[in-house]
């Protein structure tokens, strides 16, 4: 069973086009020659096409930070899967905690986004994670299971590379507070168990589960050493070229 690690940078609502080009160039240099891992960045939509030119010929993949389910139409403020592809993206983040908690996106809506991305040939990264309140109430696994089952409803499990899961405890995102390696591994093992129920065990064992939540150059190695941690979704540290370069080069 082979799971190629994926280091993904989520730039959120940061960077002008010029700043994005500069940062992407640094990521392309840092990714040069790394055959045993994948690197992805999710710039703001406005910078995608420009960044695609910068990373062309490098192994760096591009993602949208969100994606609509519809192909086109009256969806003001949304981006269609084909538009992301047109701009150079091959992946799309769906269900990020900021989409869930700041913009009120439900599991049902996230499921539609994921299905739309899949149908267009984009690889969705489905983000799931519990709040601090939910963790303290002992509901972490129940929340993760619901987010997985509802987020993946109707999604075929024929290709284990076609969907990526990101476990991102909400209390660890942008807070500087990382889950312990034990907490991360326990959640990832649980997620893989649910995937094995949804799909086949053989498929679940090949699906990638990323950890996200204050990943930085100091904690990445220990997190990546966990057996069920297959990569990282990185926010703040992805905006710092040296930090992200070190995260890409995790040991
Ligand atoms: C994220 O944006 O998904 C994230 C995990 O952010 P940070 O690394 O800043 O916690």
Image: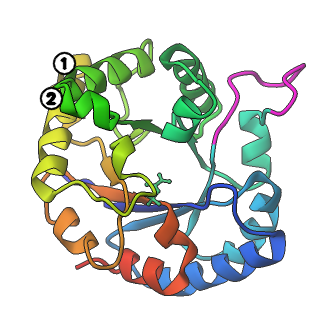
- For label 1, count other residues whose C-alpha is less than 10 Å away and answer few (under 14), some (14-19) or many (20+): few
Residue 61 vertical placement versus 195 (above, below): below
- At which x and y percent is residue 13? 69, 56
Q: How many marks?
A: 2
Q: Is residue 150 left or right of residue 11?
A: left
Query: Which of the 4 quarters of the picture holds residue 250?
Result: bottom left
Q: In this picture, is 156 found above or below 189?
A: above
Helix, strand or loop at mark 1: helix
Dot 2, how many residues are within 10 Å of its Cα: few (below 14), some (14-19), or many (20+)? some
Q: Is residue 172 left or right of residue 205?
A: right
Percent x, y of residue 59: 53, 71
Mark linked to residue 128: none
Residue at point 19% right, 25% down?
137
Q: Residue at x 58, y 24 (%)?
A: 105
| Tag shown at residue 197 | 1
Q: Position of residue 234 (x, y in %)?
A: 44, 61
Our reading of the magenta stretch's main secondary structure is: loop
Does residue 168 appear anywhere in the picture? no
The answer to whether the residue labelled 1 contacts the one labelled 2, judged by CB atoms less than 8 Å apart, is yes
Q: Is mark 2 within 8 Å of ligand 1?
A: no
Q: Which mark is residue 193?
A: 2
User: What segment is highlighted magenta in the picture?
Assistant: 66-77
The x and y percentages for residue 136 are 20, 32
* Separation of marks 1 and 2 at Cα, in angstroms: 6 Å
- Regarding residue 47, the answer to whether it shows in the image is yes
- Quarter occupied by residue 189: top left
């Amino acid at each position: 069973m082979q799971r190629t690690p994926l280091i993904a940078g989520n730039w959120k609502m940061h960077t002008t086009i010029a700043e994005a080009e500069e940062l992407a160039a640094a990521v392309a240099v840092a990714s040069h020659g790394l055959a045993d891992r994948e690197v992805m960045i999710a710039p703001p939509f406005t910078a995608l096409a420009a960044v695609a030119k910068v990373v062309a010929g490098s192994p760096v993949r591009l993602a949208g930070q969100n994606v609509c389910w519809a192909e086109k139409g009256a969806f003001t403020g949304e981006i269609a899967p084909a538009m992301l592809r047109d701009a150079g993206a091959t992946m799309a983040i769906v269900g990020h905690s900021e989409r869930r908690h700041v913009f009120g996106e439900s599991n049902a809506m996230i499921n539609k986004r994921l299905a739309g991305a899949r149908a267009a040939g984009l690889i969705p990264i489905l983000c799931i994670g519990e709040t601090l309140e939910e963790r303290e109430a002992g509901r972490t696994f129940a929340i993760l299971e619901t987010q997985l089952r509802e987020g993946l409803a109707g999604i075929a499990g024929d290709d284990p590379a076609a969907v990526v899961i990101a476990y991102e405890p909400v209390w660890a995102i942008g807070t500087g507070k990382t889950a312990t390696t034990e907490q991360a591994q326990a959640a990832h093992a649980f997620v893989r168990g649910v995937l094995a129920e949804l799909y086949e065990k053989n498929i679940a064992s090949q699906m990638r589960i990323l950890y996200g939540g204050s990943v930085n150059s100091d904690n990445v190695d220990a997190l990546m050493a966990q057996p069920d941690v297959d990569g990282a979704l990185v926010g703040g540290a992805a905006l710092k070229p040296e930090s992200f370069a070190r995260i890409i080069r995790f040991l």
